[in-house]
Amino acid sequence: MDKIKTKSRAPLKRKLVQLYAALLYNCYARGFIKGDIYTGKAKIACVPGLNCYSCPGAIGACPLGALQNAIASSDKRMPSYVLGIILLYGLLLGRTICGWLCPMGLLQELCHLLPTPKLKKSNVTRALSYFKYALLFVLVIIIPRMYSYQSLPLPAFCKYICPAGTLEGALGLLAHPANADKFSMLGLLFTRKYIILVTILASCVFIYRAFCRFLCPLGAIYSLFSRVAVIGVKVDAPSCTKCGRCVSHCKMDVKRVGDHECIHCASCIDVCPTGAISFKAGSITLRANEGVRPAGENPPAKKPSFRRWAIPAAMLAVLAGLFVYTNFFESVKADNSTVKNESIVPVYSADDTLPTGSEVGMRAADFSAPLIGKNGTFTLSDCLGKPVVINFWATWCTPCCLELPYFDRVYAENMCEIYMVAVHSNLVTDDPEAYLKDYSYSLPFAMDETGGIIASFNGSTILPRTVVIDKNGVITYNAVGSMTYDKLSGLVEEARGGRQSDTAD
C-alpha cells in the first residue's frame, strides 16, 4: 500500500523542552544579579542533567558532582541518597535525559548548527564513545574513593575536566563585578579547564555532541539503563524491516535504536518507512510517525485545544512557581535575617562612627553558631578585647580541608592572645562531626546551619573564606582563597597590633 509523509515539528518541540529544562535548573535569577549562588532548601536535590552546582542560577545539585562527593565520603556513610536519585532517573528516563533534559546537550547542539563541514560518525567515533566509561571509572569512582581514605574530598571529574563547571560555575561567577577579586585566585588549573571547555565547544561545531558521545560520565551512567528505562524510543519488532535507515540517519554512535548510545531524541521516528518506531512511556505512546499512513486516509483529528495546552501550561506553572519561591520567598527571608544580624547587633567598636558591614575597616556584625562536637555556642560579641579569626570551610571543599592544620597550628601558638573558630558552611547535606573524629584539632569548630553567617560577610558563599577581626571588632581582613601558615601568622600579628590609626595614636 502506498505511503505518504508529512513534515514533523518534533525537533522544534525537543529544543523547547531542552530550553525549558535549562531555565528550570537555573531559575534563581537573583544569583546572576548578585553574583552569588543559591543556598536554599532545593539545593539538596539533584537535577537529572549535567548542571553545575556553582552556577549562579542553579537551584539544585549536579548528580555527577553529588555522586563524586558522596563516594569521597563513603568511608563514613553509604552514598545511598545520591545513588537512589540516579537509580530513579535511570530507571525512569535513562539517556532520554541526555536528549531532552540536559543543558550541556542543548549547548552542544547549538554549536553544531554553525555552518561548517561536519565529521560523520564512523568506526573510529564508535570506538571513542567508550572513553566516557573509562572517565566514569577513573575520575568519578576510583580517585574520589582513594581520596576518601585520606579524608580529603576530590571530585576529580568536576575539578579537572567538567566543562559545565567551568562555563556555568567559574565563568558564571567571574562575569559578575562583585567577584572581581576572585581573579587573583585563578591559576594553572583554571587555565587548563578553560582550554578544555573551549576545545570541547569548538569540537562540537564539527562533531555532533562531541562531549556527550566521548567524555560525559553522566551519560555513561544513564546508558546502563538503556534496556530497562520506562520512557524512550521503542521499536515494534514485527513492523521493523531492518532497512537500517534509522541507524544511518542517527548522528550518535548507535548500532540499533534504543541501545546504550541512543539519546532518544526521536528523530528516527520520521525516517522509518513502516512506522515501527515510536516514543513511549511504558505502554503509552507519546509520539508516533503520524506521517506514515495509507494513501487517501485522512490525518487523525486534532486534539481539543485545552488538551494540547494542558501540559505546556502545567510546565510553565512549575517554572513560575520555582522562580517565585527561590527568588522571593526564600531569598527575602534570608536577606531579612542577614540585615537583622548586621544592623541590630553590631560588635562594639571604640570608634562609633564606623559603619557595620563586611568590608575591611567596618565593624563586624555579631553572630552565634552552635559548636560542633560539644555543648555551647560561639558568639562573636563574647570575644571583644582580643583579635578573632574566622575560617569558613566545608568537608567537601578540598582546599578548606588542606588549610585546617594551618589554622589549628596558629591557634595553638596564640591561644591566649586570640580567639579563633572554624565555621562549617552547611550548604549541602554533610556531617562535619564525623569528619573531625579522624583528627585531633584543638581549634573550636562551629556550624553555620543556614549559610547565613558566611553570607553576611560580603554576601558570598564561595569557600574557603578567612575573616580577621581586631580587638575592637573591626574587620582587618576578609577574602576568599587558600591560606598558608605564614600568611595566616602575619594576619594574626597585624590584628594583634590593632588598626593603624589606633597604633599611631
Image (cartoon, grey):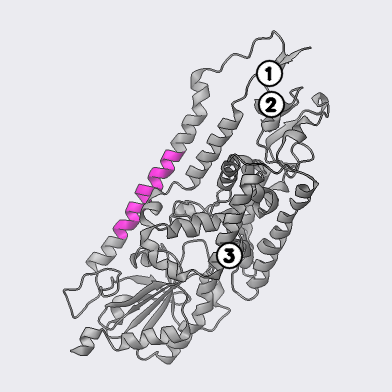
Badge 2 element: helix
Asked if residue 20 is among those painted magenta in the image, a careful observer would answer no
Highlighted range, magenta: 319-337
Q: Earlier in the sequence, mark 3 or mark 2?
A: 3
Q: Quadrant of the C terminus?
A: bottom left
Q: Is residue 197 visible?
A: yes
| Amino acid, disc 3 | Arg
Quarter residue 14 falls in: top right
Of badges 3 and 1, nearer the viewer stands 3
Badge 1 element: loop
Label 2 CA crowd tier, 10 Å (few <14, some 14–19, many 20+)? many
The circle drawn on residue 192 is 3
| Amino acid, disc 1 | Lys
Quarter residue 34 falls in: bottom left
Q: Earlier in the sequence, mark 2 or mark 1?
A: 1
Q: Is 391 left or right of 160, judged from the image as shown?
A: left
The residue pinned by badge 1 equals 5
Measure how far apart labels 3 and 1 are at the Cα level.
49 Å
